[in-house]
């Protein structure tokens, strides 16, 4: 624990604390949220901050604090889906291309170039147009769009590692390529994968929030930070900025915290391996 604290530094520990609070809030939403996030009351519209409603209520009379807590679930789940799929498929494609080289590398590179032609949000919108608006559809579409970026970065580093002695030596000994890749090559590109995953998490959270803002992601009356920013526009014009501002700050702070922690972990791991 002490070594971890030294590696992260003060800002890193603060970022870890923020992430922990957000994750615990999402996991314990049924316990800590005082109200149902989807049910409101016309008589409770636009209530200010009070002991009964900590952050006030929205235009439908729903408790904003409860919606923020429940909204953390979808706001974290979507990017997590994107990151996991991107890391698995992007890394697999990159390491396969690097190990076999030649025609395999060229063919996979052409497929990645084809995926590069589709902007992330455009691909997500096309998928939503076909399968209907939902968080799952948007997350899967973004994951496909992110794969070429992840694969290109990992391939670049793995290509440099491929010809180093620690890879060539076991290869000359007849050890299977899959074993060498998993035991030696993958651990040395892992710091880059971690850093890339945290960056992708931040971009995915922002883009999924944008899709929900446009009504293409999480659907009302479900709670989601991006949807709350959209729903809070009218409230903002009426002089009640709490919903939009708090949801927007939640997105920004979470993205910044995850990105900083990922950068510290990836950078420290890389430095340790070089040493």
Image: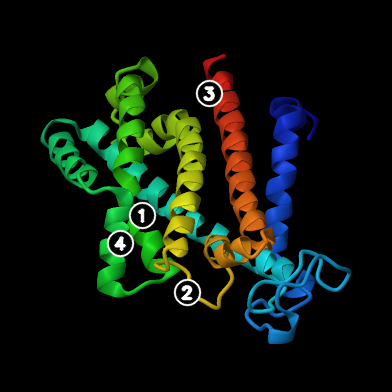
- Could you tell whether 69 is left or right of 197 in the image? right
Q: Are marks 4 and 1 in contact (CB under 8 Å)?
A: no
Q: Residue at x 32, y 46 (%)?
A: 147
In front here: 200 or 130? 130
Q: Report the disc number at residue 219.
A: 2
Bin the neighbour count of mark 3 within 10 Å (Cα to Cα): few under 14, some 14-19, many 20 and up: some
Q: Earlier in the sequence, mark 3 or mark 4?
A: 4
Instruction: Name the mark on residue 270.
Output: 3
Frontmost of labels 1 and 3 is: 1
Element marked by disc 3: helix
Of callouts 1 and 3, the N-terminal one: 1
Mark 1 neighbour class, 10 Å CA radius: few under 14, some 14 to 19, many 20 or more = many
User: Which marked residue is nearer to the observer: mark 4 or mark 1?
Assistant: 4
Q: Which residue is mark 1?
A: 142
Q: Estimate the spatial distance between the alpha carbons at disc 4 and disc 2, rounded to whole Å.
A: 15 Å
270 on left or right of 8: left
Instruction: Please name the residue shown 35% across and 22% down the image.
Output: 161
Tell which circle, 1 or 2, labels the residue nearer the N-terminal end. Answer: 1
């Amino acid at each position: 624990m002490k070594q971890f604290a030294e590696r992260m530094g003060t800002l890193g520990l603060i970022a870890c604390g923020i992430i922990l609070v957000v994750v615990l809030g999402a996991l314990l939403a049924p316990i800590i949220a005082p109200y149902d996030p989807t049910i409101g009351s016309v008589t409770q519209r636009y209530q200010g901050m009070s002991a009964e409603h900590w952050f006030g209520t929205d235009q439908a009379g729903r408790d904003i604090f409860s919606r923020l807590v429940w909204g953390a679930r979808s706001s974290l789940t979507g990017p997590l889906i994107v990151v996991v799929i991107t890391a698995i498929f992007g890394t697999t494609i990159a390491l396969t291309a690097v190990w076999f080289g030649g025609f395999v590398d060229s063919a996979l590179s052409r497929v990645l170039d084809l995926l590069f032609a589709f902007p992330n949000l455009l691909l997500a919108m096309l998928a939503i147009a076909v399968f209907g608006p939902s968080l799952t559809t948007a997350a899967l579409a973004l994951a496909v769009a992110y794969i070429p970026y992840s694969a290109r970065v990992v391939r670049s580093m793995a290509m440099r590692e491929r010809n180093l002695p620690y890879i060539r030596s076991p290869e000359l000994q007849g050890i299977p390529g899959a074993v060498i890749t998993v035991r030696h090559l993958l651990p040395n590109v892992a710091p880059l994968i971690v850093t890339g995953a945290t960056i992708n998490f931040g971009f995915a959270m922002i883009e999924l929030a944008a899709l929900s803002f446009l009504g293409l992601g999480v659907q009302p009356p479900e709670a989601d930070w991006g949807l709350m920013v959209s729903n809070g526009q009218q409230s903002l014009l009426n002089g009640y900025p709490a919903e939009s501002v708090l949801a927007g700050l939640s997105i920004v702070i979470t993205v910044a915290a995850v990105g900083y922690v990922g950068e510290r972990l990836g950078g420290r791991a890389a430095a340790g391996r070089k040493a």
